[in-house]
Image (cartoon, helix red, strand yellow):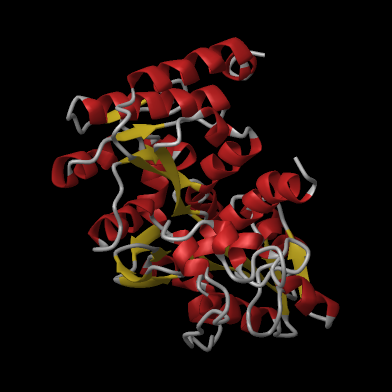
Amino acid sequence: MKYVDEFRDPALIRKTADEIARVIERDRHYRIMEVCGGHTFSIYRFGLQRLLPENIELVHGPGCPVCVLPMGRMDDGLAIAARPEVIFTAFGDVMRVPGRRGTPLEMRAKGADVRMVYSPLDALKLATENPDRQVVFFAIGFETTAPSTALTLLRARSLNVDNFSVFCNHVLILPAIRAILDSPDMRIDGFIGPGHVSTVIGARPYEFIAREYGKPVVISGFEPLDLLQSILMLIKQLNQGRAEVENQYARVVPWDGNRPALRALAEVFAVRPFFEWRGLGFISQSALRLRDEFAAWDAETRFSVPGVRVTDPKAAQCGEVLKGVLPPNRCKLFGRECTPEHPVGALMVSSEGACAAYYHYVHAMVTAGD
């Protein structure tokens, strides 16, 4: 199969790993952050860290939208879900994210009408089929999923579906990267740029990282050869003293992004002045809200939500893991109180969460005696 088999070819993977080992400077420690949770998943799944020299450290970034959602926003969503007139809809990975009231699945067990959907259009269809109910879609994700929400809202407006609304939790990747770069206790040598987000925004927006901070960025695909090639490209830049944006994932990512998707985002969304991120605190200009023209479909306008800040359970160290300060298995709760079956923190819920990926692909082998 084109673009899959060749990027999993064992001979090419070994050749690239050998090339990385050949070009590294032995007395230098390389600290590289993969921003995207999908990359973290692939690194663990394919055991790529085992193929790399010990002086290359991969640091997990905040690129998992479920993971960075603060508990207070989850509580706001659950407050809407508890209303008797509401059909509350969300993606599958949201259904097990804990708030103080429990998870959406637990709310459903208590009688709330909570339903999993595969796209916001599914939620809009529910609204047309249930005109006597209020259907709310819990929108979440980076720029990757925001266009589908935008296009659904444009369709809702064109059809004049007045019992549909969106609780918007879309966040933006670039302000989060800037917040990491501005953190005084964070040392990152280079970035593996997120592949999914970049299919929408392109590669050009990352140029400020190289220009202002002197850090190289390589946009990467998700197959093992993609990631190893991207690491090799970063190592070569660092060894040569260069800081540029390179696009390893050019077969999918256009340099200037997906222009129709970007136009839809601009038509429907505005940028919030501030938004709270789990582990990173409040970051300015880092999330989206619905424009005033779409206030009729804005769940935050239609329903009263508590809007209370909620701290994570004290023992959970989600923030440190999200910032790359702490590896997943160093959290006090990892693999004991916090497991995929009984998650305490959001990083153990999502398939893109660093803790869930580590649990399934590293912790499982260690406990099995591999």
In the displayed image of the protein, which residue is found farthest to the left?
212
Q: In which quarter of the image is residue 261?
A: top left
The quadrant of the picture occupied by the C terminus is: top right
Depth order, front residue of 118/97 = 97
Task: Give the image location of residue 137, x and y in percent.
Answer: 62, 65
Q: Quadrant of residue 33?
A: top left
45 in relation to 230, above or below? below
Depth order, front residue of 285/247 = 247
Q: Is residue 156 visible?
A: no
The quadrant of the picture occupied by the N terminus is: top right
Q: Quadrant of residue 208?
A: top left
275 in relation to 15, above or below? below
271 in relation to 22, above or below? below
The residue located at (35%, 58%) in the rendering is: 176
The residue located at (39%, 33%) in the rendering is: 219
Task: Give the image location of residue 132, x and y in percent.
Answer: 75, 75
Task: Give the image location of residue 51, x and y in percent.
Answer: 54, 28
142 in relation to 280, above or below? above
